[in-house]
């Protein structure tokens, strides 16, 4: 149920509510979004809803077809292309973070790893997913490269949405990813830039290989290897 508390600008509140609604998959991929229906549910005029929908369309969570808006419905190729971007950009984040991360950020990465291990012991997939996301976001922030952070922020909503879509296909790796996180963290802490970069490339490549294994009939393009 969507609700508004009227403290912050209305269009931003609507945007945040709709974004969470989409990321939580309360709307199905490809489902039509009707501006007037949302406005009626929120008991608002259509103006703040329209502005919120514009932002979501700009972020890629909504797509327009024949003047109608629909929930983004990613193809396997879309997901592969996003992971190809992550392969390069997050590896660069690791390289930069190995030089720029401060003690507070390093301590937070260590705490995230401990919390991830706890979630793994409990078998709590939602917590594993959340701590995994936070680990990657923290490294991006620790890179201190404002342009890289801006680019990654612009991709974040789509990446999170695609991950949520993949969950239904038993996508989450629970094999060695925590050991990979530990190795990445240690390389950053020890300021081993090239090693941190290489470890993140391997880490994301394994995620990509997992996706490809789920959809074996899909052709891989764009230059990343697919190891059999």
Image (spheres, rainbow, N blue to C red):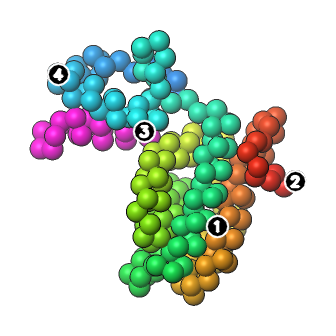
Among the two numbered marks 3 and 2 on one chain, the one whose residue lies closer to the N terminus: 3
Name the residue at 20% across, 24% down. Answer: 47
Give the residue number, with chain letter if any, for mark 1: 200
| Residue at x 55% of width, y 29% of height | 73
Judge the density around disc 3: few (<14), some (14-19), many (≥20) Cα neighbours within 10 Å: some
Q: Dot 1: within a 10 Å radius of its alpha carbon, few (fewer than 14), some, or many (20 or more) residues? A: many
Q: Which residue is mark 2?
A: 228
Q: CA distance from mark 3 to mark 4?
A: 23 Å
Secondary structure that dominates the magenta span: helix
Whether tag 3 and tag 4 are in contact, CB under 8 A, the answer is no
Structural crowding at the residue carrying mark 4, measured as other residues with C-alpha within 10 Å and reported as few (<14), some (14–19) or many (≥20): few
What range of the chain is rendered magenta? 4-24
Looking at the image, the residue that sits furthest to the top is 66
Report the mark closest to the observer, 3 or 4: 3
The mark that comes first in sequence, 1 or 3, is 3
Residue designated by label 3: 59
First in residue order: circle 2 vs circle 4: 4
Asked if residue 126 lies left or right of residue 41, the reply is right
């Amino acid at each position: 149920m969507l609700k508004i508390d009227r403290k912050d600008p209305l269009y931003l509140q609507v945007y945040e509510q709709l974004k969470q609604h989409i990321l939580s998959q309360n709307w199905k991929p490809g489902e039509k979004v009707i501006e007037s229906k949302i406005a009626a549910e929120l008991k608002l005029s259509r103006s703040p809803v329209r502005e919120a929908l514009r932002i979501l369309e700009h972020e890629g969570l909504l797509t327009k077809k024949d003047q109608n808006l629909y929930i983004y419905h990613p193809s396997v190729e879309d997901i592969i292309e996003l992971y190809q971007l992550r392969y390069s950009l997050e590896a660069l984040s690791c390289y930069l973070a190995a030089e720029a991360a401060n003690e507070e950020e390093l301590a937070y990465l260590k705490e995230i790893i401990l919390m991830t291990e706890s979630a793994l012991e409990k078998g709590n997939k939602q917590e594993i997913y959340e701590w995994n996301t936070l680990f990657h976001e923290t490294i991006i922030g620790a890179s201190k490269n404002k342009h890289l952070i801006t680019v990654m922020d612009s991709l974040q909503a789509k990446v999170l949405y695609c991950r949520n879509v993949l969950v239904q296909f038993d996508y989450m790796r629970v094999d060695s990813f925590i050991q990979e996180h530990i190795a990445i963290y240690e390389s950053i802490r020890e300021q081993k830039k090239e090693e941190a970069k290489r470890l993140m490339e391997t880490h994301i490549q394994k995620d990509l290989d997992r996706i490809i294994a789920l959809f074996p009939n899909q052709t891989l393009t764009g230059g990343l290897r697919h190891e059999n």
